[in-house]
Image (spheres, grey):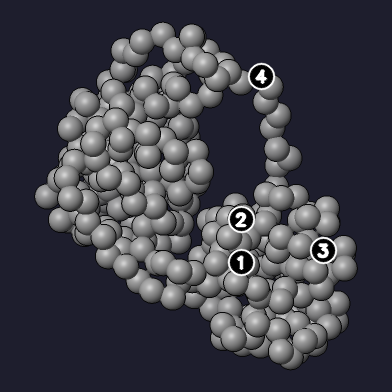
Amino acid sequence: MPSALVFFSEFSEAPSKAQRELLTLASGFENPAVSVASQVSAAAQEVLASYGVVKLYTASSEAQVFGEHELSVLDAALQATGAGLVLLANDNFSRELGARLAVRHNGAIITDVIGITGDLVATKDELAGSYSVQAKPTNGTLFATLKPNSIEDAPAAANIPLAVEELALEDSSDAKVRIAAAEAKAASDRPALTEARVVVAGGRGVNGDFGPVEDLADALGAAVGASRAATDAGWISHDAQIGQTGVTVAPQLYISAGISGAIQQKAGMQTSKFIIAINKDVDAPVFEIADLGIVGDLAKVLPQAAEEIRRRKA
């Protein structure tokens, strides 16, 4: 069985659900190691050890460069470990990172993975979840990005001593791309859209008012998503866009409110475990893939659902 290396740009003592899933998957391979492009606290190191990680490679940088430092950290850690499998997050940045290194090391990259066997056979959904595909690299290291909500978080039974190594990297101050400015996003108590177990999404049918969608999401402890029509109209941030040109989600429960369900939107949510669709149009395409369909006005249905959920929680 090959060894596994997981990469994170940052890692804290309170890792995200997606990070925990990556660690759980890596723990099933030999000598799981982690590389982080910043410093890792003692408390965070204890979390890594609880997942059976045996080696941690770290390196921080003060240079305001984009991507080059992370690329150097992962490259150096890969050379140090000789890992046969590199696991990354499923975001655009990590996909680009994996692709660049796959080319550099004559390896292979598979994105949107939902599982990997010990002999590096990766399983993923294709064509908006219409097919389940198994793929295997023909040579070199496999770089794989893991789709959130694909692996059950399961720390190892016992902590394993964690060895920490500070990587010596070349100066990246002459990088061609620099960070000109950075702005922190507004903090939210809602879960991250790509990691949430429940998502409530609104579309053109909300007519600019995402209040009922957000109220139901808060009652369920869910994330808020949207169709492209809603984000293009400026009703909600583009970060919430789900679909072919947005993010892909695979929650346990997906509630679609006022979204017609065009193929571009289906591509981003069709692999959800259970889909509830609410739409006034009985012929809306979304009903074709919904497990439960409600023909009605979302402005009436959503508040009633939120009220009933809160009543049952009380």
Amino acid type, callout 1:
Gln
**From the image, which quarter does the C terminus lie in?**
bottom right
Residue 277 appears in the picture as rendered: yes
Residue sitting nearer the eye, 103 or 200: 103
Helix, strand or loop at label 1? It is helix
Question: Decide: marks 2, 1 in contact (CB < 8 A)?
Answer: yes
Q: Mark 1 points at which residue?
A: 264
Amino acid type, callout 4:
Ala
Amino acid type, callout 2:
Thr
Question: Decide: marks 3, 1 in contact (CB < 8 A)?
Answer: no
The answer for how far apart the CA atoms under marks 3 and 1 are is 21 Å
- In the picture as drawn, the residue positioned furthest to the left comes out as 1
Q: Mark 2 points at which residue?
A: 245
Question: Decide: marks 1, 4 in contact (CB < 8 A)?
Answer: no
- The nearer-to-camera label among 1 and 4 is 1
User: Which corner quadrant of the image does residue 255 belong to?
Assistant: bottom right
The answer for how far apart the CA atoms under marks 2 and 1 are is 8 Å
Question: Decide: marks 2, 3 in contact (CB < 8 A)?
Answer: no
The answer for how far apart the CA atoms under marks 2 and 4 are is 26 Å
Q: How crowded is mark 3: few (under 14 residues within 10 Å), some or many (20 or more)?
A: some
Left or right of residue 75: residue 274? right
Q: Which of marks 3 and 4 is nearer the N terminus?
A: 4
Q: Mark 4 points at which residue?
A: 180
Left or right of residue 196: residue 143? left
Which residue is pictured at 75% across the width and 82% down the height? 279
Which residue is pictured at 30% across the width and 38% down the height? 102
Q: Which disc is residue 210 wearing? A: 3
Which residue is pictured at 56% across the width and 64% down the height? 268
Instruction: Residue 178 in the image: state x and y as whole percent.
Output: 58, 18
User: Which corner quadrant of the image does residue 131 belong to?
Assistant: bottom left
Amino acid type, callout 3:
Phe
Q: Is residue 163 above or below residue 265?
A: above
